[in-house]
């Protein structure tokens, strides 16, 4: 008798098949219970190890013993009863068929549960745009909102790096926080095919993200899964979720995108949490919160100096603070410059690092050529980055390159249709190109989305002022001034409008208030003098503003408020000093 025949006679093959099938079922049950009962991550690995160890033991027992109607007996003792065991063997055969059917059925059900009707839709190439809806905070702790929002934003950022997938930006997605609208209605409003819902649960340094992909047009479930990581491996979690979503929607990922998603650096947990807090504060745009955000980001850098992302975020927070005149450029120049350069040095594949360095070149160095190189480098690394598209829009519009400004602005609007910043950028393109009616329409759309942002009142006021509608402009500038705690940028706009409207006494009062501040902004003083018709004084102060590196002088190139100075040789000299 051959060894194969002997193995068959002793039911070793049957036992092997039973063992593998039942092991598969046990692993499925373990996977479900691990998620349901919050068992340790190593539970599944332990069960798998025990099953592997038990496999040769099961084969040995099958060789040495036989299951008979009288029970388990040694093989040598069961030889005389071989004829009587035919019925038992047939029963074992039936059991084998049943187990195989159960395994196949379980696999089919699991595949259907995860994919549902979605694969037919996906395979036809129709899921090509998604919105990642705000994640649910399962900690039930409002103090952890920054953490959940940071996770939400990070996943959107990773998904947006896939060029073949259209991903709605975070600002628009956050508009649906707490909304009870049906998914098909949201899909219609945003013109997307799919929606990603999720939740975040954190226990110490362990994070669980649960995500599900839904065909938003008919509210049908496509896929869901849990992803568990320690906080230090959070970047690997983002990459894993992104790869799985890309696999589910069957988009084509380029070799560069695959390489990017394969990189999973560890991060210092404390530094990552500080980064999330700092970014959250900086993006609230108020003077106090931006100061707190910059300090928190510096703490993140001190905790993990080799982590590039906080460096880039700190540079941008400082630059934006100076843009709104919350601080003077010389106060932040060295810190912003060092942070941006270090971010690029640490990770030259990080789009945010090139945006930060481009902003340093543009706002601090007044070097449009180098700024454009860095902005375009950032866009090459992530073509769906709304922040990069916005920076390009502002750069082109302020440089007077209005046709070039339109394309990135429209792309940003498609990615982030409910963003006040994008709507405002569109308004600025029209404002600087002197189409004030379209500027008012877009500025007004932005303001309707957020009445609490002083900059939105300010920009709409600028457009009304150019239309000669001074009463509306003054009302908007007054709102911006109060909302910003009388920030010089908005207060000077009010003084300018007073002067243009013939309200000289009020304009002079504003001028005196600005002069009495601790560190008067020459640009803001120049704007008020310009409104009063004091062009020579305005030019003197603008020259000082250029010397001081005030960011607002970038509007000299295309800003309508300065049209009355364009025939003056001193004004032309100012533009030449700035590289224009």
Image (tube, rainbow, N blue to C red):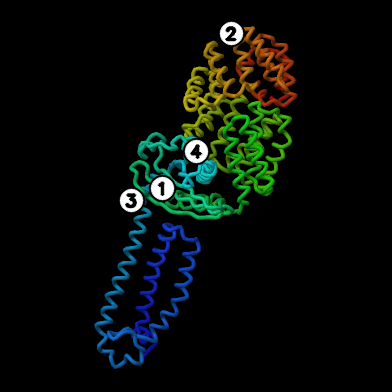
Which is more toward the observer, 480 or 566? 480
Which is more toward the observer, 367 or 97? 97
| Quadrant including the C terminus | top right
Q: Which residue is mark 1?
A: 213
Q: Which residue is mark 3?
A: 117
Pointer 3 local density, CA inside 10 Å: few below 14, some 14–19, many at least 20: some
Secondary-structure class at tag 1 = strand
Q: Which residue is mark 2?
A: 501
Q: Where is residue 485 drawn, in percent x and y?
A: 61, 23
Pointer 1 local density, CA inside 10 Å: few below 14, some 14–19, many at least 20: many
Which is more toward the observer, 268 or 572? 268
Secondary-structure class at tag 3 = loop
Q: Which residue shows up at 47% across the image and 44% down it?
A: 140
Secondary-structure class at tag 2 = loop
Label 4 vs 3, first from the N-terminus: 3
The label nearer to you, 4 versus 2, is 2
Question: Toward which corner of the image does residue 131 lie, by quadrant?
Answer: top left
Residue 468 lies, with reference to residue 35, above or below; the image says: above
Label 4 vs 1, first from the N-terminus: 4
Question: Toward which corner of the image does residue 545 lie, by quadrant?
Answer: top right
Q: Which residue is mark 4?
A: 169
Q: Where is residue 164 drawn, in percent x and y?
A: 47, 44
Residue 266 lies, with reference to residue 107, above or below; the image says: above
Cβ–Cβ under 8 Å for marks 3 and 1: no
């Amino acid at each position: 008798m051959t060894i194969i025949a002997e193995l068959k006679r002793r039911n070793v093959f049957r036992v092997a098949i039973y063992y593998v099938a039942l092991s598969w079922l046990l692993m499925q049950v373990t996977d479900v219970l691990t998620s349901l009962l919050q068992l340790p991550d190593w539970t599944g690995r332990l069960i798998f190890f025990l099953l592997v160890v038990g496999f040769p033991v099961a084969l040995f027992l099958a060789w040495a013993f036989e299951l008979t109607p009288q029970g388990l007996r040694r093989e040598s003792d069961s030889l005389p009863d071989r004829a009587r065991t035919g019925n038992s063997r047939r029963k074992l055969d039936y059991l084998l068929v049943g187990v195989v059917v159960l395994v196949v059925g379980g696999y089919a059900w699991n595949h259907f549960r995860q994919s549902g009707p979605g694969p037919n839709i996906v395979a036809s190439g129709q899921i090509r745009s998604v919105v990642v809806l705000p994640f649910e905070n399962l900690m039930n702790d409002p103090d952890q909102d920054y953490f959940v929002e940071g996770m939400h934003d990070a996943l959107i950022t990773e998904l947006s790096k896939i060029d073949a997938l259209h991903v709605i930006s975070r600002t628009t997605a956050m508009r649906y926080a707490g909304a009870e609208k049906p998914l098909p209605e949201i899909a219609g409003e945003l013109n997307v095919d799919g929606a990603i819902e999720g939740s975040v649960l954190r226990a110490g340094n362990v994070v669980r993200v649960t995500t599900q992909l839904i065909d938003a047009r008919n509210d049908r479930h496509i896929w869901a899964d849990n992803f568990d990581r320690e906080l230090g491996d959070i970047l690997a979690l983002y990459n894993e979720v992104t790869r799985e979503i890309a696999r589910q929607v069957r988009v084509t990922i380029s070799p560069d995108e695959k390489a990017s998603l394969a990189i999973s650096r560890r991060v210092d947990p404390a530094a990552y949490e500080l980064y999330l807090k700092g970014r959250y504060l900086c993006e609230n745009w108020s003077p106090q919160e931006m100061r707190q955000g910059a300090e928190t980001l510096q703490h993140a850098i001190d905790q993990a100096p080799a982590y590039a992302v906080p460096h880039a975020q700190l540079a941008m927070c400082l630059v934006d603070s100076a843009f709104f005149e919350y601080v003077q450029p010389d106060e932040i120049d060295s810190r912003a410059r060092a942070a941006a350069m270090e971010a690029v040095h640490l990770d030259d594949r990080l789009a945010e690092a090139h945006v930060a360095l481009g902003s340093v070149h543009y706002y601090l160095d007044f070097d449009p050529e180098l700024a454009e190189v860095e902005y375009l480098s950032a866009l090459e690394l992530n073509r769906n980055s709304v922040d990069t598209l916005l920076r390009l829009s502002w750069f082109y519009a302020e440089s007077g390159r209005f046709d070039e400004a339109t394309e990135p602005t429209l792309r940003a609007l498609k990615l982030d249709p409910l963003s006040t910043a994008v709507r405002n950028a569109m308004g600025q393109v029209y404002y600087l190109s002197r189409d004030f009616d379209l500027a008012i329409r877009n500025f007004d759309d932005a303001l309707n989305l957020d009445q609490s942002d002083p900059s939105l009142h300010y920009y709409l006021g600028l457009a009304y002022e150019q239309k000669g509608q001074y009463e509306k402009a003054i009302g908007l500038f007054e709102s911006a001034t109060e909302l910003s705690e009388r920030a010089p940028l908005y207060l000077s706009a009010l003084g300018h409008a007073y002067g243009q409207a013939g309200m000289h006494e009020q304009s002079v009062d504003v001028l005196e208030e600005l002069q009495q501040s601790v560190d008067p902004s020459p640009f803001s003083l120049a704007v008020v003098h310009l409104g009063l018709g004091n062009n020579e004084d305005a030019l003197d102060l603008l020259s000082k503003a250029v010397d001081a590196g005030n960011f607002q002088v970038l509007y000299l190139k295309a800003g309508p408020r300065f049209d009355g100075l364009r025939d003056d040789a001193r004004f032309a000299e100012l533009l030449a000093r700035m590289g224009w």
